[in-house]
Image (spheres, rainbow, N blue to C red):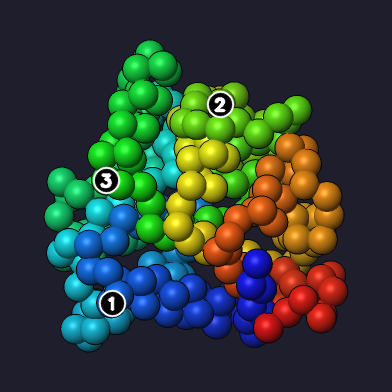
Amino acid sequence: MKIIKAKDYQDMSRKAANIISAQLILKPNSVLGLATGSTPIGTYKQLIEWYNKGDLDFSQVRTVNLDEYKGLEPDNPQSYYYFMYENFFKHINIDLKNVHIPNGLEEDPIKECNRYQDIISSLGGIDLQLLGLGNNGHIGFNEPGNCFNKIIHCVELAQSTIDANARFFNSIEEVPRYAYTMGIGSIMSAEKILLIVSGKGKAQILKKVIEGPILPSVPASILQLHKNVTIIADQEASSLLDQKLLD
């Protein structure tokens, strides 16, 4: 596990974009696992900037997103498809046929989970998976529990996650209660993992993820077992970490 300390959110975003850019230069047809939420927006903006300068080419890139709310249409402003399109895809030269996000409108969880797992398998797996970190330690929508969910599944969201996501909706009642998400096994099968963490509010949980025991009650702690994971945390998020661990 490599842990990189960034000065601030912008520095974190730039460092993360550097790693993704290097992946695309080495393998132009990489399969990128992508994340939503406020944390990766700066990374996507930096990648867009470099694309506009002619430094990056996304024409061969394939993407798979971590998750999607169950019950939301792709054109719903709060859906993750909408988020990815508005914040990233429409600004680069990616072929939308190479973009894959769980279908939130599929009522049958088994059918949708099998379909999405088949897509990932058909792509040959994920070369680099980008992750954010939830306030309760979740990655994707893998909430704290009694075991690590291995494969793509439909999950009932924890109340803390619903509360955290309520700021994106008109009211907390509008926040979906279920979501499709890659499982811990799906995430851990990626060749490389990049976790980005920002803000003082994430300091305590990041310390548990990195320095604590590996427990399903702290889902992201499983990353300690991955062979190639990089964590980039800004100064506030890394403030409680043992400074000897930081690059």
Q: Amino acid at mark 1?
A: Ile
Look at label 3 and name its amino acid. Answer: Leu
Residue pushed farthest top?
108
Q: Position of residue 38 (x, y in %)?
A: 52, 58
Q: Nearer the viewer, mark 2 or mark 3?
A: 3
In the rendered view, does 231 fall on the left or right side of 27? right
The earlier-in-sequence mark between 3 and 1 is 1
Number of residues whose C-alpha sits closer than 10 Å to that of mark 3, classed few (under 14), some (14–19) or many (20 or more): some
The earlier-in-sequence mark between 2 and 3 is 3
Q: What kind of element bears circle 2?
A: strand
Q: Which mark is residue 140?
A: none
Residue position for label 3: 123
Please determine whether, in this image, residue 35 is positioned above or below residue 170. below
Q: CA distance from mark 3 to mark 1?
A: 19 Å
Residue at left 58%, top 60%? 227
Q: Depth check: 72 or 36 in front?
A: 36
The residue identified by callout 1 is 25
Q: Residue 130, how many percent across, how many down? A: 47, 58
Please indicate, yes or no, whether residue 147 appears anywhere in the rendered image.
yes
Identify the secondary structure beneath mark 1: helix
| Residue 101 appears in the rendering | no
The answer to which image quadrant residue 234 occupies is bottom right
Residue 78 in percent (x, y) is at 41, 41
Within 10 Å of disc 1 (Cα), the crowding (few <14, some 14-19, many 20+) is few
The residue tagged 2 is 155
Quarter assignment of residue 118: top left
Residue 193 versus residue 161 in the image, above or below: below
Q: Position of residue 95 (x, y in %)?
A: 15, 55
* The N terminus, quarter of image: bottom right
User: Which tag, 2 or 1, sits closer to the chain's start?
Assistant: 1
